[in-house]
Image (cartoon, grey):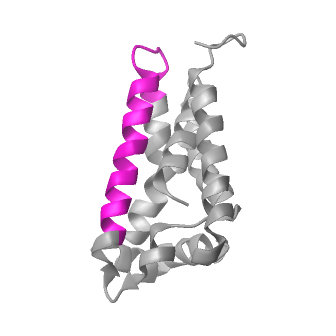
Amino acid sequence: MMATPHILTGAVAGKALASRPWLALPAAFAGHFVLDVVPHVDSHTFFGVAQGGPTVPEAGIAVADSILGCVIVALLTRSRPWRAMALWGAFCGTVIDLADNLPPWGDWFSTWPGTAWLSDFHHGIQPHLTPHQWLLGFGTQLVTIATMVWLLRRRAGGSDV
C-alpha cells in the first residue's frame, strides 16, 4: 500500500487512543499490517524494483506520496490536543516500510535473524496485484484515505469539524 493510507491510519490510531500511548503506538504499528492484507498496488507494481533498491520513478513516487500523507496529517491535526499522538501514530503506521524497504538498512533488516522474520511476514501477507488491477488497487486506498480523513476531522461526540 502507498504511504498516505498508512500514515493517515496511524494518525487515526494516535487520535483515538491519545490518552493511552502504550496502546496507540502499537495499534498504529499493527494497523500497517491490516492495511497490507487489503488488495492494493504500490509504486513498484508499475516501476519494478531495481537491483539493490528502488528505481528512480518508484523512489520519486514514494517520496511524493509520503510528503502528501505528512502534509494531510499536519493540516488536519493542527491545534488539536491529540496532535502529538497523531503524529507519533503516523510515524508508527509507516515505520515498518521505512525499516524494511529503504537502503541502506533495508538489506540489514531483511537478513538479520532478529528482524528477518518480521520482514518475511511483512512481505508475505501482501497480495500481489498486477498493473491491470490498478482500479482495485487504488480504489481500496482511496476508500482508506477518505475514511481516515473523515475520522481525523471528526470531533469527539460525533460532530464533524
Could you say where residue 38 lies in the image, as x and y percent from the top left? 70, 61
The quadrant of the image that shows the N terminus is bottom right
Per the rendered image, the range of residues in magenta is 58-85
Assign the magenta stretch its main secondary structure.
helix
Determine the image quadrant of residue 157: top right
Give the side of residue 92 with respect to residue 15, left or right.
left
Tell me: 67 left or right of 12.
left
| Number of marks present in the image shown | 0
Which of these two is toward me, 87 or 44? 44
Seen from the viewer's position, the closer of residues 41 and 19 is 41
Taking the magenta stretch, the answer to whether it contains residue 83 is yes
* Residue under the point 50% across and 78% down: 116
Which of the pair 68/157 is nearer the observer? 68
Residue at the (40%, 82%) spot, across then down: 49
Q: Quadrant of residue 35?
A: bottom right
Decide: is 25 above or below 81: below
Which quadrant of the structure image shows residue 83?
top left
Residue at left 33%, top 53%? 64
Residue 29, position as x, y percentages in the image: 56, 50
Residue 44, above or below 94: below
Please report the residue visible at 67 percent of the width from the left and 54 percent of the height from the top: 140
Quarter in which the C terminus is drawn? top right
Which percent across, then down, holds residue 118?
56, 71
Residue projecting furthest to the bottom: 51
Residue 139 visible to an observer of this rendering? yes
Would residue 23 be seen by someone viewing this image from the given angle? no
